[in-house]
Image: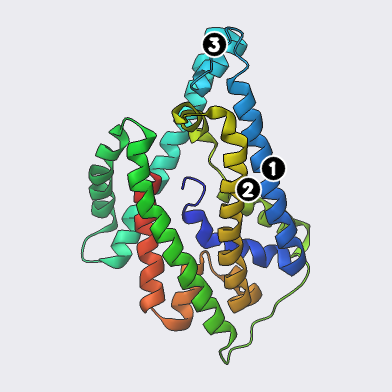
Amino acid sequence: MTAVGVGVLALPNAVAFGGWIAAPLLLVLSWALTHFQMCLLWKCLFMNPSRKQMQSYEEVGRACFGRVGQVAVAVCLYGGIFCICSLIMILLGSSLHNLAPSLSRSLWIVISVALMLPFAWLPTFKRVGVIAAIGVAATTVVAISVIIAGAREAAGPDDHEHVLGPQGIGGLGLAFTNFMNSFTCAPVIPGLIAEMKNPATFPRVAMWSFLTITVVFGSIGFAGYAGWGIDMLKFDLIVDAVASSAGKGLFGLVLGTYQAIDALASK
């Protein structure tokens, strides 16, 4: 669920940058690189000289560079996680403000922090999995909504241009960056491996997990591009494109609600 976050709402933009030919290749490349990276990390956790499985990035840093490495890794890791959580709280507050504008955006952000804080104290991934299940359900709904909205727009009277090639070299870079960013899940991998009954099966589990994620990403990205073409580049997210075509109707409400639910599940 960590990899399937609110970044999926920008995937139609990534496809628009890459075009029909380059975008599928970049999506598959991102899948392959992410899986390779996770397998390297899995191997790294078992390369402790004491022959004991390492449980965290800090232990890896200590094994490689001593106390200095442990502190440096901790600062980078938790500093990055703090920034990500801050962005998620801002996104959640903004999404709730869009759904209920009677309260200010700042107040919604404060309320979001108060609501999310207890979830940060969940002790194990099994407990977190219950919350993540909500995000999985929300992702399923949003994928179906985007596919329907894209098909409806493609069959509508408005003409949207579609291209085979990328929007220049910069377009290739932006498409690849968006795809790789959507696959981000590295911060939770050491804890996930530590919770597994049989960590030796991680590469196979990761392969099928990332394959499923790739199918979800492709469904959302290409459905959005099929509907709006390169006009997607005028919008930040697919929810904005849907709202521009149909107003804040059912699909806009579903996608806006997804932003709020996914922020909860990602926390």
Q: Residues within 10 Å of mark 3 (few under 14, many from 20)?
A: few
Say the numbered circle drawn on residue 68.
3
Q: Earlier in the sequence, mark 2 or mark 3?
A: 3
> Residue 212: x, y in percent?
57, 54
For the rendered model, the colour scheme is rainbow
Q: Nearer the viewer, residue 168 or 28?
A: 28
Q: Whole-Å distance between the Cαs marked 1 and 2? A: 9 Å
Q: Relative to residue 228, is residue 105 depicted above or below? A: above
> Residue 43: x, y in percent?
64, 25
Please state, as top left, top right, bottom left or bottom right, where the C terminus lies in the image: top left
Q: Which of marks 3 and 1 is nearer the N terminus?
A: 1
| Amino acid type at mark 1 | Leu
Q: Is residue 90 visible?
A: no
Q: Whole-Å distance between the Cαs marked 3 and 1? A: 29 Å
Mark 3 residue element: helix
Q: Can residue 171 be seen in this view?
A: yes
